[in-house]
Image: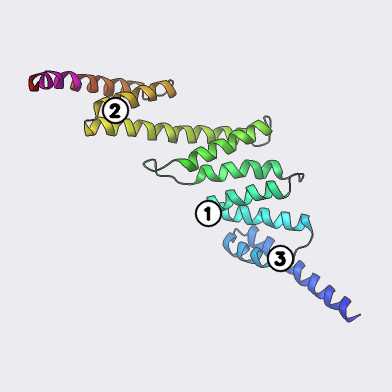
Amino acid sequence: MFATNQAHKAQSLIEQKKEAIVRLYERKRYAKANAQIELLLPMLKNRKDRSKFELYQAYGNFYTKKYLVSSNQFHLFVKQYPTFPQVEEALFMKGYSLGYEDVDIRLDQTVTYDAIRSLEHYLGVYPTGLYRSKALDMLQTLQARLMKKSFQAAALYVQLGYYNAAIVELKNFQQVYSDTSCKEQVRRLLAKCYEQLAMQQPFNLAKK
């Protein structure tokens, strides 16, 4: 009888914690909700209960701009609960979270490429999925980020006077981003490179 009462009290406490977390989440107190979820998860034995609050946790990190953590948690959700109905949502959010990670275009773009691969994987698995439109919009944003990085790298070569390297970069840019709005800028930079190289040629011949 005593053991039964203790078990009932423990379960009642868990239910109270669950309700408190949901209220915090609904009030957008995501950091506080996640702190409570950390304490709650070890107490949850039911897989549906755990999955529900693991999703809350992943979204809490997304809304507090911890995008890499959030993406990893959505990834783990997909692996742990492959047959659950929320898998499509979690698979989409894995890539979508990465897409929001603020990556300086002057730095390595591994996260951007990972986001693109994740979103393309989502579209491959769910070609007519609920999040198709959002996935396509994010892919467009990420491609624009890569395009901007590529163009700035080529423009920097021109600025530094590395004209041969700039020509290679600019021609690669033209091939990869044939529909870009930067076409005219690319043509002007190429013309400048060829002009500068032509001006240097007599000087180089004179040195010989």
Residue 65: x percent and y percent? 52, 53
**Span shown in magenta:** 197-205
Q: Separation of disc 1 and disc 3 at Cα?
A: 22 Å
Give the quarter of the figure containing the N terminus: bottom right
Looking at the image, is 184 positioned above or below residue 28?
Answer: above
Q: Secondary structure at mark 3?
A: helix
Question: Which amino acid lies under the numbered mark 1 shown in the image of this protein?
Answer: Lys
Q: Do the residues bearing badges 1 and 2 touch, measured as CB atoms within 8 Å?
A: no
The mark that comes first in sequence, 1 or 3, is 3
Residue located 51% across and 45% down the image: 100
Left or right? Give the position of 67 relative to 53: left
* In front of the other: 135 or 68: 68
Q: Is label 1 in a helix, a strand or a loop?
A: loop
Does the rendering let one see residue 183? Answer: yes
Pointers 1 and 3 in contact (C-beta within 8 Å):
no
Circles 2 and 3 in contact, beta carbons < 8 Å:
no
Q: Amino acid at mark 3?
A: Pro
| In the rendered image, the vertical position of residue 44 relative to residue 76, given as above or below | below
Q: Residue furthest bottom?
A: 2
Q: What residue is disc 1 on?
A: 66
Q: Which residue lies under the disc numbered 2?
A: 165
Q: How is the image coloured?
A: rainbow
Residue designated by label 3: 42
Q: Quadrant of residue 122?
A: top right
> Is residue 46 on the magenta stretch?
no
> What residue appears at the point 75 percent right and 68 percent down from the top-left corner?
14
Considering only order in the chain, which callout, 3 or 2, is on the residue closer to the N terminus? 3
Q: Earlier in the sequence, mark 1 or mark 2?
A: 1
Distance CA(mark 2)–CA(mark 3): 56 Å
Let me know if residue 199 is in the magenta part: yes
Looking at the rendered structure, the kind of residue marked 2 is: Ala
